[in-house]
Image (spheres, rainbow, N blue to C red):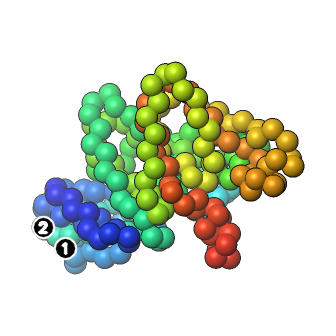
Amino acid sequence: MEYLIVGEDMQTLRVNLKKGETFYANPGHFVRKDNDINMSAQAVGGATGGLVRAFTGTGIFLAEFTANDDGEVALAGILPGKVLQFDLKEGEEILVEHFAYLASTTGNIEIQTVSLGAAFFGGAGLFLQRHKGPQTIFIHVIGGAVETDLDGKLEVQIEPGHLAAFQPSLNYDIKYVGNLRAAVLGGAGLFFANFTGKGKIICHSTSRFAFMSQSGGRR
C-alpha cells in the first residue's frame, strides 16, 4: 500500500492498493476508484455510533475499499485544506474530531462523547474518534494546520470549531468563556476547549462551523 498527497490549497489523497489489501475512509470524501477496487459500507462505533448519526446527521459509516487487483482510490476534503498523515506505532493513539477524519489503514475506531451541553453551545461537535496504532491515519484540516506542542507547563484554550485532532496524553475539557457580553462582542462563542499536560494539538486555521455558517451551509 502506497500513499501520495497531491495539490496545494485543495489537497487530494491518492492510495495505491495491491491485490488483497483493504483501506478505510470517510465516504463523504470519496473522489474516485479503479474498477478493480471493491467499495462497501461498514458501520462503526456501536450504540455510540448510532447517537452520532442521530445528533449530527452524518452517518458514522466507513467506506471499505478492497483491491481485487492492483488499483487506486482518491479522496479529498469538501473544503479547501490540507491532508495530514500520522503513522501510529503500537501503543500510540490520536483523538480526531469526527468531521476531520479522512481515512485510515484499519477500521478499528472507538467513539468518545464530549460534554453534551458544552458541545452544543461550543460548536465542537459531540464526538471524537480514538484511533490506536499500529496503523496510518489521515485527517483533513480546513485552510492550513495550526500545531501546538504543550510541555506540561502551559495551558491553552482552543475555539472548538478549530479543533481537528490531539494526542490523548493531554487533559481536555470545555470551559465557559466568562460572560455572555465578552463572548458576543469577541465573536469567540461561549465556550473554549481547554488543554493542559504534554502533547500535540492540531487545529484548522479556519473554523469549519464559521465557514459553513457564512456560506449558508449546514453545520
Residue at x 72% of width, y 36% of height: 175
Q: Is residue 145 left or right of residue 177?
A: left
Between discs 1 and 2, the one toward the N terminus: 1
Q: Position of residue 196 (x, y in %)?
A: 56, 27
Residue at x 13% of width, y 61% of height: 18
Kindly identify which residue carries mark 1: 36
Asked if residue 72 is positioned above or below residue 114 in the image, the reply reads below
Kindly identify which residue carries mark 2: 70
The amino acid at mark 2 is Asp
Q: Position of residue 139 (x, y in %)?
A: 40, 54
Q: Secondary structure at mark 1?
A: loop
Furthest toward the top, the residue is 153
Instruction: Tell me whether the residue at label 1 lies in contact with that at label 2, contact meaning CB atoms closer than 8 angstroms.
Output: yes
Q: Quadrant of the C terminus?
A: bottom right
Marks 1/2: CA distance?
A: 7 Å
179 and 29: which is toward the camera: 179
Residue 25 appears in view: no
Crowding around mark 2 (Cα neighbors within 10 Å: few <14, some 14 to 19, many 20+) is some
Q: Is residue 196 left or right of residue 32?
A: right
The quadrant holding residue 158 is top right
Residue at x 29% of width, y 65% of height: 13
Residue at x 79% of width, y 49% of height: 183
Q: Is residue 33 left or right of residue 193?
A: left
Crowding around mark 1 (Cα neighbors within 10 Å: few <14, some 14 to 19, many 20+) is some
Please state the total of marks drawn on the protein image: 2
Q: Position of residue 77 (x, y in %)?
A: 43, 67
